[in-house]
Amino acid sequence: MFRFSLRTLLVAVMVAGTLLGWLGSQWRLVQARKGFNGQALADGGYAASYFVSQVMCTSDDYPGFHETEWQTPSIPFWRRWLGDEPVGLVVVPAAWPESEAQRAKSLFPESPVYWRRQVLSLPPSG
């Protein structure tokens, strides 16, 4: 018969709770990214997949885009399992306040983010 102490049980519950909490935060991030994209599409912006964004945009439209177009964006494998996908370009609707544009920078760190035709962030190099 398998026996374990109360301390072992508490450690196991703590580890399981930590993992589930982390997984929940990743799930909320994926849902926030999907919600942002849906809301941006409704208001005239978008968060396009990498291959679509290469066809849709030029450096004349979005300065700095060509410097990053050959770097395939990536996201962790567990976020792919949760239904997320890498985004190649984020265009925040011009009517949105700057706070929403800054939120897009934190939601999509793998892609360039543009607001009012100005680059807010480029993905990290490397």
Image (tube, rainbow, N blue to C red):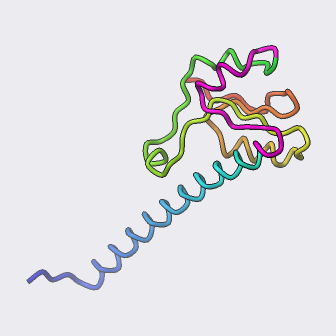
| Residue in the image at 83% along x and 34% along y | 115
Quadrant in which the N terminus is drawn: bottom left
- Identify which residue, 10 or 27, lies in the foreground: 27
> Where 118 falls versus 27 (above or below)?
above
> Where 13 falls versus 114 (above or below)?
below
x, y percent for residue 34: 64, 49
Quadrant in which the C terminus is drawn: top right
Q: Which residue lies furthest to the left in this view?
A: 1
| Residue in the image at 43% along x and 71% along y | 17
x, y percent for residue 57: 73, 20
x, y percent for residue 106: 69, 45
- Identify which residue, 90 or 126, lies in the foreground: 90
**How many numbered marks appear?**
0
Q: Residue furthest front?
A: 42
Is residue 58 a member of the stretch shown in magenta? yes
Q: In which quarter of the image is residue 124?
A: top right
> Where 51 falls versus 12 (above or below)?
above
Q: Quadrant of residue 117?
A: top right
| Residue in the image at 49% along x and 47% along y | 79
Magenta highlight range: 41-60
- Identify which residue, 124 or 71, lies in the foreground: 71
x, y percent for residue 2: 12, 80
- Identify which residue, 55 or 72, lies in the foreground: 55
Drawn side of residue 78 relative to residue 39, left or right: left
| Residue in the image at 81% along x and 14% along y | 60
Drawn side of residue 89 relative to residue 17, left or right: right
